[in-house]
């Protein structure tokens, strides 16, 4: 069973998180720390006592925006330890997701925290720690992709996605109504959605052919108009794109 430490400078949020963690059968114990500095002291003691010591910590559920040492700072410090605990970020802000996953976070849970979403983060942590059997992953729904917004998981129709932008090992999906960050590499989406009319136009962009309004040529450069946004096409992909658009016409 996992031994967890929750870190949040807002006491109501901290108490709720500790309560939810202790209610999960995969959590052997969950305690709280009111700031990152206190958490660092406790994690250091835990590592000094060893993996089987009485203060051992397997996973830290970490807020990001805190006074002084913030959650990202703490996570960076933990990467310097030989056997650091796993990190799950629990925050009200989507904007730090790419940085969080660059720090090898197990998961990124948005506030307000839902019991079901937190349970998924615990499952991932337990799987990584080897305290839970690996559950086979089901094939994704080909017509929708799950995205998290404000602590709620929504299923965005693939047909609504105009283009996809690479952000590190993650991707930002753009639709006519906004954008969503997902923890899936652009290369994976390219392979998955090739048969649905998505084509790579640049190392950073994947575009749905049906949403291309114009192909523009200007002084040797090629770009496409997707909605109101103009996207550059690399030389490597320009010929293939022109051929695809001609066949579509």
Image (cartoon, rainbow, N blue to C red):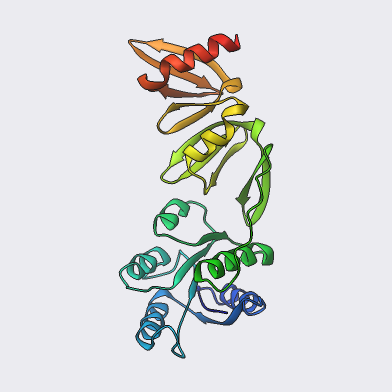
Quarter of the image for residue 13 reads bottom right
Quarter of the picture holding the C terminus: top right
Does residue 168 sit above or below 100 in this rendering?
above
Q: Is residue 152 left or right of residue 182?
A: right
Quarter of the image for residue 176 reads top right
- Name the residue at 45% across, 64% down: 65
Number of numbered discs visible in the structure rendering? 0
Q: Which residue reaches farthest bottom? A: 54
Residue 122 lies, in percent from the top left, at: 59, 68
Q: Which residue reaches farthest left? A: 80
Pick whichever, 51 or 64, lies toward us. Answer: 51
Pick whichever, 217 or 51, lies toward us. Answer: 51
Residue 67 lies, in percent from the top left, at: 41, 70
Q: Is residue 73 left or right of residue 87?
A: left
- Name the residue at 53% across, 62% down: 91
- Name the residue at 60% across, 73% down: 17
Pick whichever, 138 or 72, lies toward us. Answer: 138
- Name the residue at 46% across, 67% down: 87
Quarter of the picture holding the N terminus: bottom right
Residue 129 lies, in percent from the top left, at: 50, 71
Residue 225 lies, in percent from the top left, at: 51, 19
């Amino acid at each position: 069973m996992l031994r967890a430490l929750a870190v949040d400078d807002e006491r109501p949020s901290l108490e709720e998180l500790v309560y939810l963690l202790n209610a999960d059968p995969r959590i052997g114990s969950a305690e709280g720390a009111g700031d990152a500095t206190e958490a660092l002291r406790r994690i250091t003691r835990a590592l000094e006592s060893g993996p089987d010591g009485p203060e051992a910590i397997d996973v830290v559920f970490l807020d990001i925006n805190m006074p002084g040492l913030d959650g990202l700072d703490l996570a960076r410090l933990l990467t310097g330890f030989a056997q650091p605990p796993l990190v799950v970020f629990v925050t009200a802000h989507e904007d730090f997701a790419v940085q969080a996953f660059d720090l090898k976070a197990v998961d990124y849970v948005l506030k307000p925290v839902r019991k079901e979403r937190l349970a998924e983060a615990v499952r991932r942590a337990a799987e990584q720690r080897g305290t839970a059997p690996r559950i086979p992953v089901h094939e994704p729904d080909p017509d929708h992709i799950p995205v998290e917004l404000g602590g709620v998981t929504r299923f965005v129709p693939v047909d609504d996605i105009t283009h996809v932008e690479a952000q590190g090992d993650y991707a930002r999906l753009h639709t006519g109504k906004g954008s969503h960050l997902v923890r899936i590499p652009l290369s994976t989406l390219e392979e998955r959605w090739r048969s649905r009319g998505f084509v790579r136009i640049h190392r950073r962009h994947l575009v749905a052919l049906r949403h291309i309004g114009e192909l523009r040529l200007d002084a040797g450069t090629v770009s496409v108009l997707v909605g109101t946004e103009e996207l550059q096409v690399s030389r490597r992909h320009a010929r293939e794109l022109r051929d695809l658009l001609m066949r579509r016409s």
